[in-house]
Image (tube, rainbow, N blue to C red):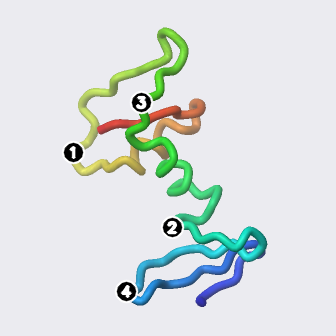
Amino acid sequence: MLKKDGKYVECRTETGRKYYWDKKAQKSYWFKPGSDEDRLSKIMNKDIDGPPGANIVVLQVPQDWQEMNIYRHFSPFGELLSLRM
């Protein structure tokens, strides 16, 4: 166990991968619930369509961008239901 942050304890697996332990629910998570990483993991590659006209295609994204860059860039403008690269 590394750090206690209120409800969650930051831990490491035997191989050193970080995870979070919810003390109350007695569950573990790869990403801290509520973090950008947690929200992104829930929407990645889901086949969900928004209302008609709500889907967008973004071209000429910088080549070094990953899913998290896209999520952080567009999430301030509204809820992202799915994300595919």
Q: Kindly identify the residue that appears in the image at 53 percent across and 75 percent down.
A: 19
In the rendered image, residue 2, in percent from the top left (x then y), is placed at: 59, 89
According to the image, label 3 marks what residue?
47
Q: Secondary structure at mark 1?
A: loop
What amino acid is labelled 3 in the image? Asp
Cα–Cα span, label 1 and label 3: 24 Å
Residue 46: x and y in percent read 43, 36
Q: Say what amino acid the circle numbered 4 marks.
A: Thr
What separation in Å lies between label 4 and label 1 (alpha carbons)? 30 Å
Q: Residues within 10 Å of mark 3 (few under 14, many from 20)?
A: few
Amino acid type of the residue that numbered disc 1 sits on in the rendered structure? Gln
Lower sequence index among marks 2 and 3: 2
Is 33 situated above or below 4? above
Label 4, label 2: how many angstroms apart (C-alpha)? 14 Å
What residue is pinned by disc 1? 63
Please, what secondary structure does the residue beneath circle 4 have? Answer: loop
Dot 2, how many residues are within 10 Å of its Cα: few (below 14), some (14-19), or many (20+)?
some
- Look at mark 2 in the image and give the residue it sits on: 30
